[in-house]
């Protein structure tokens, strides 16, 4: 697995474009951090020129969570051309008129959009809430997908201890857990945890009742002594460096961390707790204030090629939604190379060819795991209730050592300031004499 895309490289790309005047020659991409093979970005202008005869320069910016991205577009009216929100956020943006249709006319260039597995095209069409008569596939094309679960260090944590989301309350894990700083991806699994009686997870995913929010808030507040921090992308490093035992995370971060950890003889594993969880997907969309729909649409098409899917998976640890035989062959090869021997049924994604194949089960959850996972949905006007709860929970999450360091630093600053004022006073008196 390659090292991940560095922010400095991203800024360089952005910086180089600051002087670009002609907007038709600029493509502004807004993506999650650690979520692409940087070479693929660099190669896009060459490919675009070959396909269209036109020059393009990429401005690439990163976000950590869906809500930050939304604020930038909804409130800030930022003119990004292509953005990568998650399922529930695609719903939100579509239903609030924040998306433009993808232009699927690529001239002589083949369309690769149908490389997206029918599993996801069906989910876009039938599972996401959209205005009447609208097919979400006209506005969004899948990119990566996965589940939410626990990444854990097998030296300190037994699998049975993390077979439940209640693990975050285990007093043995004091200050040892990093939580994903993604309100929906924590709220929804906890919703499943507090409702063992509910069998239809799909409908549960819409619940934002005051009682449910309060119950989730109580669990999170009770878990705070165990929470060492909130992270959107650095939890995987905390785990490989053994600075935490447990990380509430996405399967892609887990896969990346497990491979990196193996190189330094740290054994990490990933589990989707018994109660069930969420599976999620992210997709490319063109936001309302985009100014280069043509290049954005070509970029989305470019990303759907099997080759790009394979390279992006290799660089990030995340799993592409592309369901072609080339991708299946590649994931089987790397699973075998990495020592996996067990076969799984992943026909839900690859069709009949995926009936009995050797794959990494963190990458491709078994049908049994998929059966206890559900897709999240936008909470619409109740989102604010959820986010307020999140802020209350996180609000003062400074651990005691950090508070002590802050107090010591402030005291030191005050001490030196007072000392230097005193010295100046003495010097001034000396000069007068
Ligand atoms: C990668 C972000 C993955 C987003 N840093 C999962 N929805």
Image (cartoon, helix red, strand yellow):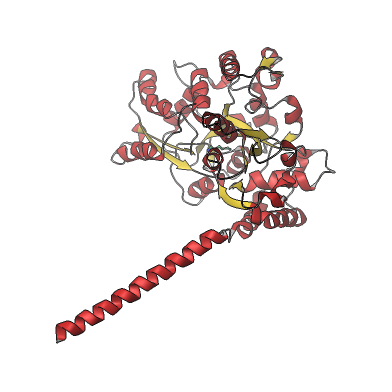
Q: Quadrant of ligand 1?
A: top right
Tell me where residue 371 sits by quadrant.
Answer: top right
Q: Is residue 192 visible?
A: yes
Q: Nearer the viewer, residue 146 or 203?
A: 146
Q: Position of residue 312 (x, y in %)?
A: 50, 26
Q: Position of residue 119 (x, y in %)?
A: 67, 24
Residue found at the far right of this picture: 197
On the rendered structure, is 286 left or right of 202? left
Q: Is residue 206 visible?
A: no
Q: Residue at x 60, y 29 (%)?
A: 137
Q: Residue at x 60, y 33 (%)?
A: 267
Tell me where residue 370 sits by quadrant.
Answer: top right
Q: Position of residue 227 (x, y in %)?
A: 62, 52
Q: Nearer the viewer, residue 372 or 359?
A: 359
Q: Is residue 162 above or below residue 416?
A: above
The mark tally for this picture is 0
Q: Residue at x 43, y 65 (%)?
A: 409
On the rendered structure, is 5 left or right of 416? right
Q: Position of residue 45 (x, y in %)?
A: 36, 26
Q: Residue at x 41, y 40 (%)?
A: 7
Locate the C terminus by quadrant: bottom left
On the rendered structure, is 363 left or right of 107? right
């Amino acid at each position: 697995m390659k090292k991940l895309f560095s922010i400095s490289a991203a800024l360089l790309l952005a910086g180089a474009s600051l002087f670009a005047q002609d907007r038709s020659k600029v493509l502004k991409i807004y993506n999650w951090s650690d979520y692409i093979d940087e070479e693929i970005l660099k190669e896009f202008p060459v490919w675009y020129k070959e396909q269209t005869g036109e020059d393009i320069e990429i401005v690439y910016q990163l976000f950590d969570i869906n809500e930050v991205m939304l604020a930038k577009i909804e409130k800030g009216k930022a003119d990004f051309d292509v953005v990568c929100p998650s399922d529930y956020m695609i719903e939100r943006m579509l239903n609030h008129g924040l998306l433009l249709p993808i232009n699927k006319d690529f001239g002589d260039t083949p369309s690769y959009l149908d490389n997206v597995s029918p599993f996801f095209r069906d989910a876009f069409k039938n599972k996401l809430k959209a205005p009447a008569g609208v097919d979400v596939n006209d506005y969004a094309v899948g990119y990566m997908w996965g589940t939410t679960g626990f990444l854990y260090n097998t030296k300190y944590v037994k699998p049975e201890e993390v077979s439940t989301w209640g693990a975050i309350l285990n007093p043995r894990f004091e200050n040892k857990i990093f939580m994903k700083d993604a309100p929906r991806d924590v709220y929804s699994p906890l919703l499943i945890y507090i409702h063992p009686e509910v069998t239809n997870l799909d409908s549960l995913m819409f619940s934002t009742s005051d009682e449910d929010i309060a119950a989730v808030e109580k669990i999170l507040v009770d878990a705070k002594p165990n929470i060492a921090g909130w992270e959107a992308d650095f939890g995987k490093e905390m785990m490989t460096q053994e600075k935490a035992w447990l990380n509430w995370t996405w399967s892609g971060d887990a896969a990346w961390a497990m491979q990196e950890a193996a190189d330094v003889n740290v054994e990490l594993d990933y589990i989707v707790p018994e109660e069930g969880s969420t599976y999620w997907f992210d997709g490319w969309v063109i936001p309302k204030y985009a100014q280069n729909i043509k290049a954005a649409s070509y970029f989305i098409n470019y990303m759907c090629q099997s080759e790009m899917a394979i390279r992006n998976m290799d660089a990030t640890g995340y799993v592409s939604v592309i369901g072609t035989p080339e991708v299946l062959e590649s994931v089987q090869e790397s699973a075998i190379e990495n020592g996996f021997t067990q076969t799984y049924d992943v026909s839900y994604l690859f069709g009949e060819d995926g009936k009995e194949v050797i794959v990494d089960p963190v990458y491709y959850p078994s049908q049994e795991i998929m059966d206890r996972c559900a897709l999240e949905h936008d909470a619409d006007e109740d989102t604010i209730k959820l986010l307020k709860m999140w802020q209350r929970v996180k609000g003062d999450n400074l651990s005691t050592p950090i508070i002590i360091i802050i107090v010591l630093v402030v005291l030191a600053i005050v001490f030196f300031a007072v000392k230097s004022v005193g010295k100046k006073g003495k010097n001034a008196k000396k000069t007068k004499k």
